[in-house]
Amino acid sequence: MIPEEKDPEFENLLIYLRQSRGFDFTGYKRSTLNRRVRKRMHSLSIESFGDYLDYLEVFPEEFNNLFNTILINVTAFFRDSLPWEYLAEQILPNLIKNKESSDQIRIWSAGCASGEEAYTLAMLMVEMLGIEEFRQRVKIYATDIDEDALNQARQATYSAKAVQAVPDELRQKYFEILGNDYVFRSDLRRSVIFGRHDLLQDAPISRLDLLVSRNTIMYFNSEAQTRILARFHFALNDAGYMFLGKAEMLSMHSRLFTPIDLKNRIFMKLSSVNVRDRLLGISNLGDDESSSRLSRHLRVQDMGFDAAPIAQVVIDNSGTLILVNQQARTLFALSSKDLARPFQDLELSYRPVELRSLIEQAYTERRPITLTNVERYLSNTETQYLDVRITPLQETDTSFLGISIIFDDVTPHIKLQEEMQGSQQKLETTKEELQSTNEELETTNEELQSTNEELETTNEELQSTNEELETMNEELQSSNEELQTINNELSERTAELNSTNIFFVSILKSLQTGIVVIDNNFNILIWNYMVEDLWGLRTDEVQGKSLFSLDIGLPIEQLRSLIRDSLSGKKQFQEIILNATNRRGRQIKCYLAITPLLDISIQGAVLMMVDIEKVNSMISTQEIEKRQQQQ
């Protein structure tokens, strides 16, 4: 895989974060880190990483904002429902069945964010064990590096939208409603223990039956992923389960875990682990450079063992097959599924030769045992000859780690010996052919090895791309939630504005006076129904037009100077009575009052107009009614 190009300014920023704040992000994927940091810089209008480092030095409180931007806390109850269904139906029942009734069940939710997945595990376990047994037996450890997310998780308070994915029956059973929020039951929360934990720096939680880490390790580079998975392997009990996210695969860690259901990302720990994997698990206790070097050396050793031209298998002292190289897989049709199986259950243990008694003999006599020219019948006409060497792997003077068995295909040599009995000339010819064949085999082996390495590299690149896409998907989901919140706020404001507008229109309709509002260009903004009744023009006919462009029975030009005085602020209130003709053609005296529009954002004036005769009639009517009441 082509290494990611490093930006010196960006690397200096990461070093500053580690030295000043104690957070080491160097194990995270550079592309993801770069994108998240730039997002925060964009919100502050900062262009370069150097300038942003200076900003952090001046404003240390910015670190919290950066930290929250880098850590994408996208999670949900029963996230990706199908894997959770498989976990509940197939894995958890087996986990409980394999435990004694008094044994504790320990679960770790690594990268728990705001706690939804930890509480999902709690609900599933209560459904299977009952409340009392759950309290007594189950411990769920939920960890994350983000303290803000952990504080939210400890409160166990979620919005109605957040609990939509929880089935109605479980929601009613395990949540209490508090206002508009849902709170997880406090009596069950005691079994869920939250704490801050750095997967790369802190020691793993041990003796686990189930480890849930969904879409967490995909943010780390391949070196960091190897270290984390080695720690996960150490943390799990023998045959413990690991539950990963949909974008995470373990194609390069088949000696640590075996897939139970690859589609749902459920894996089981392989209990028989060689010294190489133990060393890899502790390599991160030293500095980053030495651990990376040790990791590379171990991988080279693995590849060297796998590329050996002679078939070899290794069995541990409990009789379990733990290592098989490429030649042995090809020769005896073995696969990765045969790893961790008892050797006595394999056909290889008794064919082409009975090896079980020979293994015991090697242990008893404490020496290698060699068999030559072992016949292996491939077909009715073809026979293969093998030299078999059984070597005990002794760690001290009194204990053995296991047995190494080497199968050397000597069939060509046997055939050569048979031909040598014929003629020396044929022997020389056969030697040349054998040499040529051997060279071709070696060339083919090298080509196959090179092709295999290229395929592994391509697989790693595809896996990295898949993880990157999943990371971007979670970022988009986080941004979508932010936009949804803003949209809800805008909807609320729009509703308030509509309500205010309706209230304002109702007031205008309730007034028994003509109201006209104009801006500082004399354009009409408001024209209420009383004005429509006076001059016979509808609102949609005049709105946005200049007041002085209207052809109505009011001598508008006489108002120009008055309106200008009002717009300029010279006079706050003016009134005038004009002779006019209403829409019915009747001569009236029109009373007008002009005041400036008191609005910071809009300059204009308000014109109030009314037919004096109509007002007098209303006043006279009111006086008559008043006298009648007094009488």
Image (spheres, helix red, strand yellow):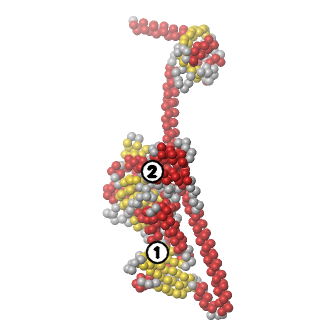
Closer to the camera in the image, 555 or 279 = 279
Image coords of residue 546 (percent x, y): 63, 20
Q: What residue type is labelled 1?
A: Leu
Give the residue drawn at x 54%, y 82%: 408
Residue that numbered label 2 is attached to: 20
Q: What element carries label 2?
A: helix
Relative image position of residue 441 (x, y in whole percent): 62, 78
**Which of the two discs, 1 and 2, labels the residue nearer the N terminus?**
2
Residue neighbourhood size for the residue with mark 1, other residues' Cα within 10 Å, grouped as few (<14), some (14–19), many (≥20):
many
Residue mark closest to the camera, 1 vs 2: 2
Total marks placed: 2
Quadrant of the image containing the N terminus: bottom right
Gap in angstroms between the C-alphas marked 1 and 2 = 49 Å
User: At x 64% / y 83%, what residue is drawn?
Assistant: 435
Q: In this view, does 541 lie above or below 390?
A: above
Instruction: Tell me the kind of residue under disc 2.
Output: Ser
Q: Quick check: 256 above or below 477?
A: below
**Number of other residues with Cα within 10 Å of mark 2, as a class: few under 14, some 14 to 19, many 20 or more:** few
Q: From the viewer's perspective, tell me whether residue 141 is left or right of residue 16.
A: left
Instruction: Quadrant for residue 518, please give it.
Output: top right
In the rendering, at what x and y percent does residue 597 appear? 54, 20
Residue sitting at 44 percent across and 9 percent down?
625
Q: Is residue 607 visible?
A: no
Q: Where is residue 344 in the image (x, y as percent from the top left)?
A: 45, 78
**Residue at 47% of width from left, 55% of height from top?**
24
Residue 235 vs residue 367, the one in the foreground: 367
Name the residue carrying label 1.
Answer: 321
